[in-house]
Image (cartoon, rainbow, N blue to C red):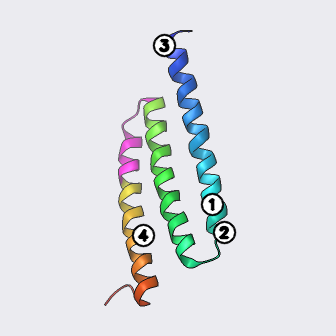
Amino acid sequence: MTTATLLSAASLFALACVLLAMLLCTLRLLIGPSAQDRVLALDTLSMCAMLLALLLGMRHGSDIYFDAALLIALLGFVSTIALAKFLLRGEVIE
């Protein structure tokens, strides 16, 4: 087994694991018994989307995926902070 074949198989396995994690996060987002569970699922889903973009960038060798991952990470962080502040105080902007 060559190194290229092994790396290709490992990247496919990592993609499958991230997609499975995204599916489970989506289920938690839809079913979650409380709002805090849903916010945590949304944060984890954004992190999985960032990892998916990074894995696709490594697999295809394109730099645009890394820029997209950075943008997803930034938007995921800001949205999680806004939702947590909303759940804590009932308003986002003071």
Q: Are dots 4 and 1 in contact, CB under 8 Å?
A: no
Question: Which residue bears the numbered disc 4?
Answer: 80
Question: Which residue bears the numbered disc 1?
Answer: 26
Which label's residue is closer to the chain start, 3 or 2? Answer: 3
Element at label 3: helix
Is 27 rendered above or below residue 83? Answer: above
Q: Are dots 3 and 4 in contact, CB under 8 Å?
A: no
- Give the overall secondary structure of the magenta segment: helix
Element at label 4: helix
Q: Amino acid at mark 4?
A: Thr
Q: Amino acid at mark 1?
A: Thr
In 3D space, how far apart are the residues under numbered discs 4 and 1 (Cα atoms)?
Answer: 16 Å
Res 30 quadrant in image: bottom right
Which label's residue is closer to the chain start, 4 or 1? Answer: 1
Indicate yes or no whether the magenta region holds residue 50. no
In 3D space, how far apart are the residues under numbered discs 3 and 2 (Cα atoms)?
Answer: 41 Å
Question: Which residue bears the numbered disc 2?
Answer: 30
User: How busy is the neighbourhood of tag 4: few (under 14 within 10 Å), some, or many (20 plus)?
Assistant: some
The disc placed on residue 3 is: 3
User: How busy is the neighbourhood of tag 1: few (under 14 within 10 Å), some, or many (20 plus)?
Assistant: some
Q: Amino acid at mark 2?
A: Leu
Res 8 quadrant in image: top right
**The magenta segment:** 60-70
